[in-house]
Image: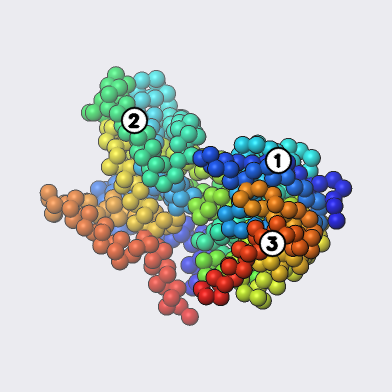
Amino acid sequence: MKAILRSRLTPLVALALIMALVPMIAPTSFHLRVAALVWIFSLAALGLTILMGYAGQVSLGHAGFLGIGAYAVAIGPARLGLDPLLCLLLGAVLSGLIAWLVGRPILKLKGYYLAIATLGFGVIVALILHSETELTGGPDGMSVSRITLFGWRVTGALNWYWVSAGALLIGALIALNIAASPTGRALRALHDSEVAAAGAGIDVSAKKLAAFVVAAVYAAVAGGLLAAMNGLITPEAASFSHSVELVAMVIIGGLGSVFGTVLGAAFLVVLPQTLTAFQEYEQAVLGLLIMVFMIFLPQGIVPSLRAMIEERLP
Amino acid sequence: MTPQTPLLDVSGIGISFGGLKAVDAVSFKVGAGEVFSIIGPNGAGKTTLFNLVTGIYRPSRGSVRLDGADITAVPPHRRVSRGMARTFQNLQIFFRMTAVENVMVGCALSERTSFLADMLGLPSVFRQNRVTREKALALLDRVGLAALADAPAGALPYGALKRLEIARALAADPKILLLDEPAAGCNAVETEAIDHLIAEIAKGGIAVVLIEHDMKLVMKISDRVLVLAQGRPLAEGPPRAVRENPEVIAAYLGDIGSREADRAHG
């Protein structure tokens, strides 16, 4: 039992099983769309799990990278006549490149200072998407053309469900691979002590930058999928509240846990849908639930539950 | 035992903080297989000198040469690949990792997988992990911590953590090892284990630079001793000569006496 709990690929197998089960029990295509949103936001949050959970570097502007990926898929086909799938990849590359340029100076900052600098980055991206009306359609956003995968035009809730699930499985596999590799050890080491990591010969700033770029690529791919699935994108995608939501997903699920990140994303995507009965108090109830969760599972869902289960096992 | 070609050559090094000369005009040479100790009262600048030699501080004056090459401007993580490893006075342990993982991090320089291979989880990554773990386990065995390999580092007692740091530093295959108070806070048995360990490391041809307050340990294992007082060198030589130097007795040993009195009361 303990071996299963600790095995590297257990979260991946569990995730694949859940992915296979959901379409059998989802009553309507609306439910499938919500599930697809969970997979897409999980993917965006997984990048933050690598950056925050492994390497201990916070980003409060991560929705900015999500926005870059989303608008690449929107703008490329509409304004430049490019293939939407190619734009998804270009958006990921562009996002990684911007992360590399922005990350070099700001990753020298630590803790609160890094949080504020990344926040500033997110605000700038949202502002540009708002004000460059010619290019982005401004606050009203713009429509996004369909993605074609090797001649197959992706439409309908079920197809998007499988595409987003596949993307998340690949993202989860990469995150788990990193965790079990020399790179993952280096990231976890600098999380605990940068001076000791440097003392082991690790280039701390290069490793932090790599984690930042990878996290930006995750967010951009998720943003591109989000835009293409919804067929519409607004600057809201890059908003500060979205950045905070991504951070909350990572922390509620359990810092550094891949499966926990998916649970955290599910929590924050599904709950608002079920809380509509509370009408104007919806946000307040959601906030209250987050507080209760953090009080009773202070390390996040997965690490707290794992500790409880391991305590009870012989 | 004066070395023929010094492995480490520190020359006229100094740094000032806000006008105060924390370390000033310190020079020393250390050869392979030598144990060189730096002693001095609290605040004499010993750890500052370590931070200058390992590159955490940039010196305002003087130079550091390793194996003949000037490394004064080389950042700390690159000094490791040139053969310089250290431990820290205030433990710098990766507390969220296990003991063996801490040492595996120390092996980072000998690991040969690319970032891309790590992301894709190629078989070479797992082969590398096995090789690294074997090496780390051997080092844990060498410092007497083999039984605690898979324990979380946060659960290890203080004396064990001191030895864990030495194992992690050795994992970088250094030519020169700088140990900042390896026996501080250790009991007599643990101190003796560290004494044997240092002697064995030096016997393997590694130069050891040691900061230590335990005078018995210093006098027993050092080939040469440098005495610092207020950031300046006060005396240098074999342990016996240093111990009998009247200036050293006046500046330093009085302080030891009061410290031991403190310890007895605390």
Q: Which of the pair B10/A206 is nearer the observer?
A: B10
Give the residue furthest to the right.
B4
Q: Residue at x 65, y 36 (%)?
A: B61
Which residue matches tag 1? Answer: B12
Cα–Cα span, label 1 and label 3: 24 Å
User: Dot 3 falls on which chain?
Assistant: B
Q: Residue at x 60, y 41 (%)?
A: B15
State which quadrant residue A24 falls in. Answer: bottom left
Element carrying mark 2: helix
| Marks 3 and 2 on same chain | no
Q: Is residue A179 above or below residue A203?
A: below
Q: Is residue B159 above or below residue B225?
A: below
Circle number at residue A124: 2
State which quadrant residue B157 falls in. Answer: bottom right
Whole-percent x, y for residue A12 in the image: 47, 57
The residue type indicated by label 1 comes to Gly
Which residue matches tag 3? Answer: B249
Whole-percent x, y for residue A127 in the image: 30, 28
Q: Which of the pair A132/B3 is nearer the observer?
A: B3
